Amino acid sequence: MSVKALVFLLCLPAMAWAQGFGGLGTQADGFTTPRPNPVFDFPKDHGPHPDYRIEWWYLTANMTGPDGAEYGLQWTLFRSALAPEIGVGWTSPQIYFGHAAVTTKDAHYVSERFARGGIGQAGVTPAPFEAWIDDWHLKGDDFDTMQMHATGPDFAYDVTLNAQGPLVFHGDGGFSVKSAKGQASYYYSQPFYDLSGTLTLPDGPVSVTGTAWLDREWSSQPLADDQSGWDWFSLSFEDGNKLMGFRLRQTDGTFFASGTWIAPDGTATALRPDDFIASPLALSDVGARDVPTTWRVQVPRFNVDVTTTALNPQSWMAVSLPYWEGPVTVQGSHTGRGYLEMTGYE
C-alpha cells in the first residue's frame, strides 16, 4: 500500500514506540498533512517529501525460476522525520531504513539497514531516479526502467524492472483515506513492472523472471488513534486485472476497508469501504503468534471471490518492529499471484 510499514515508529518519540503499530495514529504536530484534490508533480514527487513525517518506496515481486519454483522478493526504503525542521548534514532530522527479503517455499531471508539522512548514507533523488541505503539501490534514468540490488547475510538479488503500464493513483486521485475520522495519505503505485534477473541463495544463483509492484506513499498521520494494524493485498490476476485492497483493524473489532480495481490498461476504479471484504480462513503458528495466512477476498462489484494462500506461511519479517510479508497464490473466481502484508500481529 501501500499504506505500509510502520517500522517508522522506531524513529518516533518513546510514547509512539510504546503504542506499537497504533503509534502512527499519534498527532502530527508541525508536519504537513495530506489534503484532498492533490496535484502531483513528476518526476519531483518520485523523490522525498521531508515536510511529511513518514514515507516509503516499497517494491514486491512474484518470480519463477527455470524449474518452475516460485519466489518472492521485497525491497523497501523508509524515510521518517524526527521533527518538522529542515537541517543539513548531521542536523538533518531525516532517518532512513531499509528492508530486503527473498521468500521461497521453504525459507524466508530478511535483512535490515539503518541510516541518517543528510550525510549521503541514504536518500532519494527524483531525476534520474535513485533510492539507496548503503549499497542497496533502486535506480534508473526514469521511473519506468530501473535496476534493483540488495544483499543480506544469506541472499542477494540483482534484477531489472521495465514498466508495461501507467502509474495508478489510489483513493480520490491519489488521496487515500484510511479512517472514518479522515486520516489519509498520498498514494500511487506502479503495478506493471516486468522483472528479470538473478537471486543468489545459499544453494547458488537462480535466474528468475516475473512481475513487480511498487508503492509510493507519504503522510504524517495515516492511522486513527483507534487503529492497530492492517491486512494489505496486491493481487495480479491472469486475465490482466489487478486489485489493491486493505482493511485497517480497529480496537472495537470493526474494520475500515478500501481498495482499487485496476483494469489491464491501468484504468483505476476506487472501491467503496463495503466493496472490499477480506476474511481470514486459516491461522499459522508463526513464532508463537497466530497469523492468518489463508484468506478469502471478495469484491462483489467486480465478481471477485478468491482464496489467497501464502507461498510460505513463515514469511515473518523479524526486523526491529516485526510484521508478516510474503507472496501468495490466488485461486477461485480469478487466478493469479500477489503479495500480502499484515502488521500489528507482533
Image (spheres, rainbow, N blue to C red):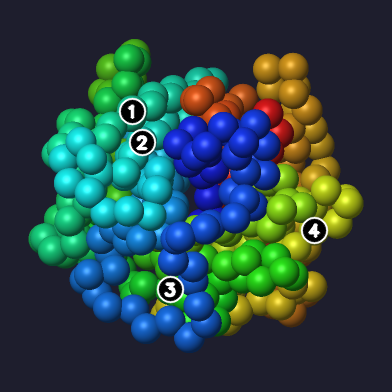
- Residue 323: mark in rendering: none
Q: Residue 153: x and y, percent? A: 32, 15
Name the residue beneath numbered marker 4.
255
Q: Earlier in the sequence, mark 3 or mark 1?
A: 1
Whether residue 142 is visible to the viewer of this picture, yes or no, is yes
Relative vertical location of residue 26 with respect to residue 236 in this rendering, above or below: above
Name the residue beneath numbered marker 3.
168
Q: Is residue 139 left or right of residue 292?
A: left
Q: Residue shown at 64%/56% (left/top)?
A: 223
> What kind of residue is marked 1?
Arg
Name the residue beneath numbered marker 2.
97
> What kind of residue is marked 4?
Phe
Q: Nearer the viewer, mark 3 or mark 1?
A: 1
Secondary element at image label 1? strand
| Occupied quadrant, residue 109 | top left
Dot 4, how many residues are within 10 Å of its Cα: few (below 14), some (14-19), or many (20+)?
Answer: some
Q: Residue shown at 27%/78% (left/top)?
A: 41
Depth check, front residue: 134 or 157:
134
Q: Earlier in the sequence, mark 4 or mark 2?
A: 2
Name the residue beneath numbered marker 1.
113
Dot 3, how many residues are within 10 Å of its Cα: few (below 14), some (14-19), or many (20+)?
Answer: many
Q: CA distance from mark 4 to mark 2?
A: 29 Å
Say whether marks 1 and 4 touch (CB < 8 Å).
no
